[in-house]
Amino acid sequence: GALPFRGIPAFLPSSFDPTPTTPGPTARRNTIMRALLALLALLGAPRATGFGLRLGARTGAGHGVGSGSGLGCGSRRRHDDAKTMTMAMSLSDVRKAVASAGLALALASPLALPLQEAAARSMPEITLEALQANEKTLIDLFQERTASVAYINTYVQTRDSFSLNVMEVPAGTGSGIVWDKVGHIVTNYHVIRSAQSAQVVLSNAAGDKKTYTAKLAGYDADKDIAVLKVDAPPATLRPIALGSSQNLKVGQTTLAIGSPFGLDHTLTTGIVSGLGREMRSPTGRPISNVIQTDAAINPGNSGGPLLNSKGNLIGMNTAIYSPSGASAGIGFAIPVDTLRVIVDTIIKYGRVVRPIIGITYLESSQARALGIERGVLVLDVPPGSNAEKAGIAGTSRDPQGYINLGDIIVSVGGYDVANEGDLFKALEKYQPGDTVSIAVLRLPPGTSQRSAFKSVDDFTKKIALQLQSSDSVEARVAQPQLQRGG
């Protein structure tokens, strides 16, 4: 009356009843005995000599089982009130017994079937088709966005030492983003810094590549953003879909496409691993609200897009944190909300104008060596500048050769300034031509910085200054020598 059940080991006795709904007393007894046998075997019975356990079942022709040592199986029978069978089990038999005991216990329990069904319902089924569907989504996304990512080669001119001929040599590689149908390509400023010419390689959906000579539309070194222009047919340009970086969450999927180490159109994946980071631009100004990702970003990825799972742009890959120079799982991207404002301004005006005081300053890391624990030390004040007209004093040397420290800016518009980063943040609130109140610490000759802070109010001076345009900021950074064109 036992129903056939696929998967039951062949060595089970014929009286074993695998029916899960109406298990008989013989099946229960066999189940319990085999479970005890498996437990004892695990406790050391397989390698013990002379160890045996006999369980007799007084059921007319009941069966008993026992364990002993040996590599083979043998049995001896004696006829008493019950018939007892002793089996010597090898290690492989123990493993089979354990498996069959667990299976028998599951089958013998009236609650087994409902529990198994409940467990099956609670566990999501991951099929090969589902995995392939996810992979296909990723593949389709990459193929669709490849045409929106540019491969940039930069060159500098050098003179051959033998022929004295001027020739172009590669200076570096980077990535770019197709911004619009007009031919604007967005990349990092440091990708084209000091370059004398650049070429942009674009791909279409079929994978065909074409190279274009790029012109410089403009750049913002303070935000490490540059815009190039190529004369490509509008039909071949695939502008990238813009997303938003405002509502990003840590844990969201990210995809980075770029040209690491010159390997064009490489895809890496990761997550948003941090938000609200801050990094320094080539001019020293802070770039705020930077996105941190663990998607592999390497040299050559700079200027490439960081996408969300929908394929929309959420940032531009810009920098990595790595002791070795290669990806260490900490990459940074300029958020698309910042990128959109800067790029639109560059395309419209050819430059980005910011308010500046019009001075040169000493970096805080070097100022600490002079005992300046907070504030920004003024090094030089250009003649005729608004800073000179307002009375800001720069650092100078007296006739005896001693250095007299210049003014130390400690506040701008009521905003405390501890370093140059705070100074730039305070100026971001204003426009060129605005008048702002600046508090400076002016030390008398021979006064040390540390002693001055004990009575800082005695040396603090407030100055009203009209902010000037940042057109002169370009003199502080290396100049791209690409041909201009918008």
Image (cartoon, rainbow, N blue to C red):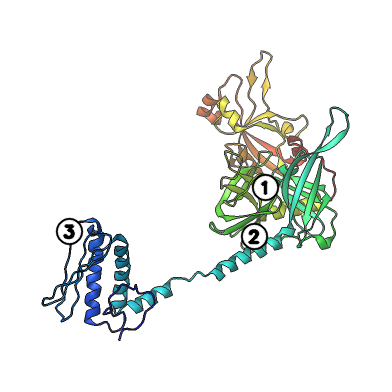
- The residue tagged 1 is 260
Residue 395 is situated, as x and y percent measured from the top left of the image, at 67, 25
Residue 476 is situated, as x and y percent measured from the top left of the image, at 73, 35
The front one of 125 and 153 is 125
Label 2 sits on what residue type?
Ser
The mark that comes first in sequence, 3 or 1, is: 3
Q: Which residue is drawn at 28% across and 79% down?
A: 14
Label 3 sits on what residue type?
Gly
SS category of the residue bearing label 3: loop
Quarter the N terminus occupies: bottom left
Residue 285 is situated, as x and y percent measured from the top left of the image, at 66, 41
> On the rendered structure, is 336 left or right of 158?
left
SS category of the residue bearing label 2: loop
Cα gap from disc 2 to disc 3, whole angstroms: 76 Å
Residue 472 is situated, as x and y percent measured from the top left of the image, at 77, 38
- The residue tagged 2 is 244
The front one of 196 and 472 is 196
**10 Å neighbourhood of mark 1: few (<14), some, or many (≥20)?**
many
**10 Å neighbourhood of mark 2: few (<14), some, or many (≥20)?**
some
Residue 31 is drawn in which quadrant?
bottom left
- The residue tagged 3 is 50
The mark that comes first in sequence, 1 or 2, is: 2
**Tag in front: 3 or 1:** 3
**Tag in front: 2 or 3:** 3
Residue 469 appears anywhere in the view: no
Q: Residue at x 26, y 65 (%)?
A: 73
The front one of 196 and 281 is 196
